[in-house]
Amino acid sequence: MSLRIRLAILSSFITLLALIGLSVITGVFLQRSLIRDLDEELEVQAGQILDEAKDEAKLGKSIQISNDLENALVTATGSTTAFLYVQGKLEFGAGQYDAPNEPLDSSFLSQNQNLKRCDCDDWRVISLRSNDLAVQVGRPLSIITRNMERYVSIVAVVSLAATVLAGLLIAFVVSRTVQPLEKLAQRVKNLESGELIPGVGLPDEIGVLARALEQSLSQLQVSRARQNRFVADAAHELRTPVTALLADLETHRARPRQESENQAVLERFFRNAQHLRRLINNLLTLSQTERDLQLQPLNLTELASEVTDRLMPLAASKNLELSIDGEPAKLLGDRLMLERALENILGNALKFTNSGEVRVLVKTQSQKVILIVTDTGIGMNNGDLELVFEAFHRGDSIVEGSGLGLAVVKAVVQAHHGQVKMTSEVNVGTVVRLEFPIRINA
């Protein structure tokens, strides 16, 4: 069952309940109003009869109701039946209704009340007393009953018509309202379509949803384009060393070589294998940063010292000074991820530094844990500095590499809610600064 049908049925049901409740309340007030008006009219008629009877009794005349007063018992709302009692005995009766054989309210005659209103045997009765005189006037309640039945009939027809009309109106309004949602649904089914998102300009909730969808779709398209570009670049980067490795193997297998030539080929095999390993490790690190980190309490200074120790042979092979200094800096992080990031930073610094030194500094400052790597390498220009954290970007460097190292660093730092900054000057050196917020401190 569609949303518009469910809403139409629900609105019709609510409308019907509301009309029934309103009709019941109105009916109760209407019935009370009719009885109140009847009581007022009966009290006036009873008072007139009682006044005339008292006047005739004072004059010593036989108590009789005048023709004018008897005619006054017949009004536009109905005819009244009236009885006059003297000392509890019936003196006369008047009215167009067939009077009952007994008093309209027999209990009143035995009591000392001066005024009484009563629903007696389907009659509405008003009783008045003055000394020995008692008057009872009444009308059958069937008059009010017939009026209420007509009211109920009219209300039933009006309620039914109003319910149907409300259902049709709600169905129409809902149909118009959900049209933009249906268009949105159709557009979502075809994400690759270049069509505009419908409803973006609407000021209501549908417009909010459409704008959110447009923003999400834009981000998804950018992410998908970046992913496609990354996969293509990764495939290209993997293909190059694999092709070179296969070419060397094919050439080596094609003809016998001298021992010295075999050694050179093995060295190329080894370099290609190392390059493949670094590339695969970096690709795995980039993919793992998209998932949950394996967080544990770490001392960033100790971790940086371990990475520095492992890279000391590389620094020594290039006659570079590699040093680390700092204070204990505890944080909550993924050990493997942070190691990979530090290895890439220090590896880049050593790779692009031909003389001088590479220094590592770890400290805490302004609610942050900070690691700074400074080198005296070849540096880079501003154009490369803006793109250096993009995957597979190598700039103008002729040094062998995959272009993934700093992209891995950025991904790891961002996964730890941190920031990475870099400054560089050609032929002077480069400074890489990692900052982690204090909120992830252990």
Image (spheres, grey):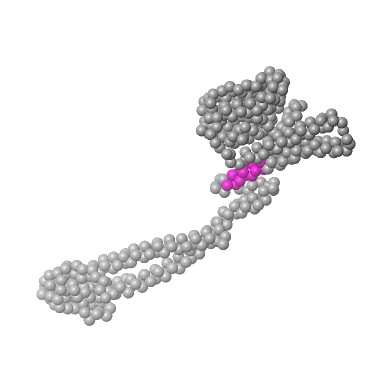
Q: Main secondary structure of the magenta part?
A: helix
Q: Which of 4 and 424 is in front in this view?
A: 424
Which portion, as a residue range, is magenta? 209-223
Q: Is residue 434 in view? A: no
| In the depicted structure, whether residue 239 falls above or below residue 9 | above
Q: Which residue is drawn at 64% across and 50% down?
A: 188
Q: Which of 270 and 177 is in front in this view?
A: 270
Q: Which of 52 and 372 is in front in this view?
A: 372
| In the depicted structure, whether residue 314 falls above or below residue 64 | above
Q: Position of residue 81 (x, y in %)?
A: 25, 75
Q: Which residue is drawn at 39% across and 71% down?
A: 150
Q: Which residue is drawn at 26% across and 67% down?
A: 39
| In the depicted structure, whether residue 19 falls above or below residue 425 | below
Q: Position of residue 140 (x, y in %)?
A: 29, 74
Instruction: Answer with the quarter of the image where residue 123 lies.
Output: bottom left
Residue occupying the far front of the picture: 259
Residue occupying the far right of the picture: 255
Horizontally, residue 363 falls left or right of residue 241, namely left
In the image, residue 219 lies in the stretch drawn in magenta: yes
Q: Is residue 2 in view? A: yes
Q: Nearer the viewer, residue 384 or 332?
A: 332
Q: Where is residue 408 in the image (x, y as percent from the top left)?
A: 66, 34
Q: Where is residue 201 in the image (x, y as percent from the top left)?
A: 60, 45
In the image, residue 170 lies in the stretch drawn in magenta: no
Instruction: Answer with the quarter of the image where residue 82 lies.
Output: bottom left
